[in-house]
Amino acid sequence: MKKIAVKYIFISLFVLLSSPALPQDNALFFDAAGTPANPKVQVSWNKYHTYAGVTDFCKKLAEAYPDLVTLSSPGKSFQGRDIHVLTISDKKSGDPDHKPGFWIDGNIHSIELQGTEMAMYTAWYICEMFDENTFINQLLKDKVFYIAPTINPDSRDYFANTGVPPRSGLMPYDNDRDGKFDEDGSEDMNGDKNISQIRRKNPDGTFITDPKDPRRMIRVSPGEKGEYEILGMEGIDNDGDGMINEDGPGGYDGNRDWGFNWEPNYIQGGAHKYPFSQPENQAVLAFITEHRNIAGAQSFHNSGGMILKGPSIQGGGAEAYSSTDDAVIDAIGKKGELIIAGYRLVTIWKDMYTVFGGELDWWHGAMGCFVFSNELWNSYLMFYDTASTDQYEFDRLLLFEDSFIPWQKMNHPVYGEVEIGGFSKMAGRLHPGFMLETDAHRNAAFCIYNSFQSPKLEIKDLKVTKLEGGLKEVTATVANRRMLPTHSASNIKYKIDPPDYVFLDGGTVIAGMVVENKDLNITREQKKNPRRMELSNINGYQQISLKWLVKGGNKYTIRVESVKGGQTSAQAE
Ligand SMILES: [Zn+2]
């Protein structure tokens, strides 16, 4: 009996160790719609990942799907952590880097953690659905995703292990300009991995506890008697300068560091030294400049339940943003409002604030991409009701007070007897576990829709006609089957990418022309190098017909090469 038990334990251990992510037993489940039936990589989407967790996930996905996934690191964070990028596409159907690309990044701001989970979920979903779903299968044949779950990994771990990090990365910064760097941050005085509020009993204070919910502090009306004063966040005066928590880790802004419409720190707070002066953004830049095929991009922030679109430039940046680009961005963004229930489409400069050196404007102005930034989570999602947004009630009724740290007495070296407590770092901006997967799926679906709408070029009506004198006429039409043009207006204006090329291989090309009106036989000849016809842009849903006169040859190949529109070819005799 004992022997069998030992043997059984041994086998169980062996199974556990040899395959850490066992596929589930199909006898125990059947499929829900729209969900991978039997994922090779098992992930709990109701938790947040440490950097080690992100790394582990990326490695497992790359190992499980070698024909789809390549894991790379274009650079390291300030503290030396790799910035992971997952390249995901059907490798067998063509070189991923020659397909229209879609970029996703998360967590540029440290406390905006869940962008990482949105990015990871998207990566996981398209891999696990590749063999199960016709739409996803075709999408990965046509397109490529470049997914960077966290582009600020140092602060992510800081968040997990200590209290609430700054908005920035962890490069030391002299916030109070006293010549010392990061010398006076907050302290987790009760060791609960949270930086909580401090309150102190004071009859002259301006706060009392709410009789309906004594956890809540409310301000008294003028003349009314108070009970408490609020003294900021947990911490002490480390450097003895009479201020508490005035120079914590970091202190700049990763989203004011991008090389388009950039301004220095005295004009744009958080800008740091010069464009791309932060190592994490340098790594991202290195990857993106090597992947000019990226046509669309998505960056994840929190919070507010918004799908942000550019410009964030003061006055609307008419110089960089045209109405034709805006029409495309609007059409995709409006669909986003439907896909991500509870989120609304917002123009940054008009509806929020203006930004210099923001990532969004850089993508559009310097890379010619169509880009969105989603502010994840909002108070509406608590009760699906704009009128009921009480966080205390949500915490009480749905989380059973799990996101609130009860006020507890402690002795503070400066303030004496105080109480610390309040909402934990997981409340307010971050999804509670049970809602994380839902929003991850909706945000992934928005990315998938966006990527789907990047150009899909096809060659149709390829025809060879014999003419007199041994000449042949070759005609073909290049069609873009999707909403995005191969070139945004900003791309054309700033000459970011070369034009789209249409090659004719086989025979000697005597003349090449674009057919401007088929019925009236109006053409525009390209005198220079007609073997390689140049199209400045192929608009969304546009079709462009071409005509060549060719001498010799008997097999003709038409090849389209577009940086952001991908490559395709067709042959005729
Ligand atoms: Zn943010």
Image (tube, rainbow, N blue to C red):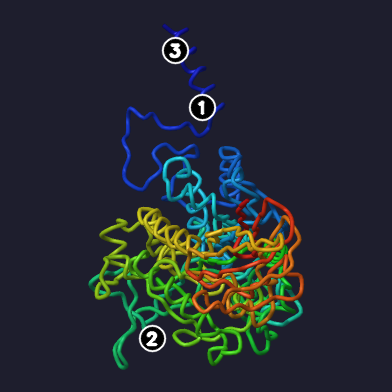
Q: Residue at x 32, y 34 (%)?
A: 29
Foreground mark, 2 or 3? 3
Label 1 near ligand 1 (CB < 8 Å): no
Q: Residue at x 73, y 58 (%)?
A: 75
Image location (x, y in percent) of residue 533: 68, 69
Whether the residues at callouts 2 and 3 have beta carbons within 8 Å, the answer is no
Which residue is under mark 2? 204
Image location (x, y in percent) of residue 473: 64, 63
- Name the N-terminal-most of marks 1 and 3: 3
Is 366 in front, or is 465?
A: 465
Residue ranking furthest to the front: 468
Q: Secondary structure at mark 3?
A: helix
Which residue is under mark 1? 16
Q: Residue at x 57, y 46 (%)?
A: 90
Asked if 52 appears above or below 513 in the picture, the reply is above
The number of numbered badges drawn on the structure is 3
Q: Which mark is residue 278?
A: none
Image location (x, y in percent) of residue 23: 45, 32
- Name the N-terminal-most of marks 2 and 3: 3
The N terminus: image quadrant? top left
Whether the residues at callouts 1 and 3 have beta carbons within 8 Å, the answer is no
Task: Judge from the rendering whether residue 7 lies leftward or rightward of residue 564; answer left or right.
Answer: left
Q: Secondary structure at mark 2?
A: loop
- Name the N-terminal-most of marks 1 and 2: 1
Foreground mark, 1 or 3? 1
Is 525 in front, or is 275?
A: 525
Foreground mark, 1 or 2? 1
Which residue is under mark 3? 5
For mark 3, does the 10 Å Cα neighbourhood hold few (<14), some (14 to 19), or many (20 or more) residues?
few
For mark 2, does the 10 Å Cα neighbourhood hold few (<14), some (14 to 19), or many (20 or more) residues?
few
Task: Say which amino acid is labelled 3.
Answer: Ala
Whether the residues at callouts 1 and 2 have beta carbons within 8 Å, the answer is no
